[in-house]
Structures are given as structure tokens and as C-alpha cells.
Amino acid sequence: MNSEELIRLSESHSAHNYHPLPVVISSADGAWVTDVEGKRYLDCLAGYSSLNFGHGNPAILAAAREQLDRLTLTSRAFYHDRFAEFATGLSELCGKDMVLPMNTGAEAVETAIKVARKWGYEVKGVAPGQANIVVMEDNFHGRTTTIVGFSTDPESRDGFGPFSPGFRVVKYGSAEAIREAIDENTVAVLLEPIQGEAGVLVPPDGYLAAVREICTDNNVLFVADEIQSGLGRTGETFACDHERVVPDMYVLGKALGGGVVPVSAVVANADVMGVIGPGQHGSTFGGNPLACAVGDAVIGLLRTGEYQARARELGAFLHARLAELGPGVAAVRGRGLWAGIDIDPSLGTGRQISEALLRHGVLVKDTHGSTIRLAPPLVVSRDDLAWAVDQLSAVLREARA
């Protein structure tokens, strides 16, 4: 079947919870994908950072293939021979004691919320049922009912209540707003070091360090959602590393699964994670052998520092080229190989610009009106990045004409 027929069948027989661009991808390699008609596109979204190491990364695929032939699932009712290596490696990568593995990013965020609340009751001494967590405006932590309950995006939130109480929403980028929201029942501050879905919003310099200080002073856990920003995307292993800040909990996902299987985790020290006992949290597939084999391969790639260095160097090149675009671009934000580009609304919506880039052979995704996001795999070449920016420049010229 051709693209048109496949799209028609997809729209007829699946829920319309996404609005994909009209392209049907059938194969991929590195930073490039190919549709069913054989046309190639440069992937500048990388599965929202799930494909940091590229499509079909040889080391990740080799680990997955080897594990597929041996063992894929036991459930956590038993130990398996890949778990210890994965848990130890991820703990060491994060500089923490303990890992609680899950599958999706949203599950990991839910896990972090549960751990923080339980820590608040058992360690901090918060009265039962009174714990609160400070969260940020314009956050995106997933789409479960608990999480959308503290979203400020009407599209994510409207029609899904009633919502779980216990969250206080404050302005992102304002450390003082966090300080004012904390009281004796606050157990955690949950934030994205860089807000991806909101348009790759980078907070002011010193913000993360100030949040760390406020949390320490008030005996509150600092929970960093590094699901999109972590594992090399910004030029460091974690976005928090840019301010040499260490949170109490890392929430990880997306790239941890290497674009092969869903793998997520919460990582913390024993004085925090130790509050969780048998039967209090879990997942049948969380920490399964295949996930651990893939996750361990990802950890191995990050240990070398090669991908972090590529994101730093190519990110500097990308942002320099984006700064030259001129008319049609209202603002550019980002860090490493991650950019949010605000297009002049008079030239079109983010969706329209994304569709125009699709015709030029570049895949991106819009968000919040006239903003588009660039997040290519970290294996992308300098020449390919330059070509992608050239295509954006051409699209903007066409829109101005």
C-alpha cells in the first residue's frame, strides 16, 4: 500500500490522539528515515530524544539481538542475569545508590511522585495525606490523570478531571516563586531542567543552583525530569550538569531505551529510594532482561563521553547557523542539539512550517502555535545540520514571498 492508503486506514481504525505529519516511514538508518515510496528525510525530532544515538545504532541493536535469543521477560518475581549490571551501571552514571526501573516516562514521573510522598511521610514527618509537591507552569511530564492534573495546558487537562490534589503550580524560571510556595508539608520540587514540550525553554542562569539551595534549606527533594533533556541531548550527560547541580532524584526515559524498547527509571540515594518496600510499587515489564540489555548498551555509549561532546560541538554549530536566519524567526532557544524556534506568526503556524519542511525532506514537530523544535539524533553530521537549516531558510523565503 502507498502512503495515502496507509494513512487512510490508520485514521479509520485508530484513536485520533495524535495529528501526525502526512509521511509513512518504513526504514531508517542513523539520522535519516525513508518512507514507503522511497523518499528520504532527515529526522530532526529523534522520537523526542528517544533516538539520541540514531536509528539502528549498531551497539544497541547487537545487545538487543543477543538478548532476544536468550531471555526477554521474567517479571520482577525473580532475579535475572541482566538486572544487576543495568542497575549498577545506571546508578554509577547518575552518581546515586539505587534504581527503580519502569517502562515509560510517565510511569517514571508517577514513580517519583510516589517515592517523594512516601519519603515525606516516613522521613520528613509530614502529616498523613498532607504532602504537596511544587511544579512548574507549562510543564510536560506525561499524560496520566495525575500528571495532567497539574498541567497548565488546556489541551492536556480539559475533560479529564477530577484530579489528584497536592500540587502547587508556580512560574518556571523563578526560584523565588518556588521559595514562596514551599511550606512545612512540601516534600518535593519537580521540574524539567529545560522545558521541551513548552518550546525548549531554557531557564535563567543560576536557576537550577538556586532551586538546589532552596530544596536543601527546606528539607525538600529536588526531582529533575531529565526524560527529554538527559542522556547527552544538551551536551552534558544531564541538563543539570550545566550548573553542576545534583538533584535528589533523576527521572529518566526515552533515550534510555535506545529507540528500541521503552525503558525508564527513577534514580536516587538509599535514604530516599529506601522508603519503597516489597509490593508498594512495581511493573511487570519494568527492568525486564531485554530492557536491561538495551539500557546497559546505552549506558556504555554515554560512558565514553563521545555523544555528549558531539552534542556540544554540533549544538554550537547549529545555534550559530540558526542565529543567521534573520527575517521570519522571532526567537531561537535551546542548548546542545536541541532548539526551539519561534516563527513569525504572519508567515504561518508551526504546523504549516513543519509541513513545508516535510516537502523539503526535513522532519520536525511544532508546538504551541508558531514554534517548531529541532532535536536531531546525536549521530547527525555537520553537513546534514547545515542542509537542514538551509531548508528552513528556503521555507521561510517561500513563506515571505
Image (tube, grey):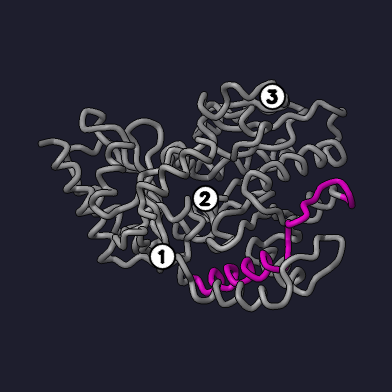
What residue is rendered at 48% in x and 71% in y? 57
Question: Quick one: quadrant of the N terminus?
Answer: bottom left
Q: Is residue 337 visible?
A: no
Residue 228 image label: 2
Question: Residue at coordinates 86% horizontally, 46% vertically from top-left?
Answer: 280
Judge whether residue 120 is colored magenta.
Answer: no
Going from N to C along the chain, the mark reached first, 2 or 1, is 1
Q: CA distance from mark 2 to mark 1?
A: 21 Å
Q: Which residue lies under the disc numbered 3? A: 163
Q: Earlier in the sequence, mark 3 or mark 2?
A: 3
Viewer-nearest of discs 2 and 1: 1
Along the viewing direction, whichever of 37 and 377 lies nearer the viewer? 37
The answer to which of 246 and 257 lies nearer the viewer is 257
Contact, CB < 8 Å: mark 1 with mark 3?
no
Q: Secondary structure at mark 3?
A: loop
Q: Nearer the viewer, mark 3 or mark 2?
A: 3
Instruction: Kindly identify which numbered label has been placed on residue 28.
Output: 1
Q: Which residues are magenta?
A: 277-305
Rendering coords of residue 122 (x, y %): 87, 40
Q: Considering only vertical position in the picture, is 57 above or below 106?
A: below
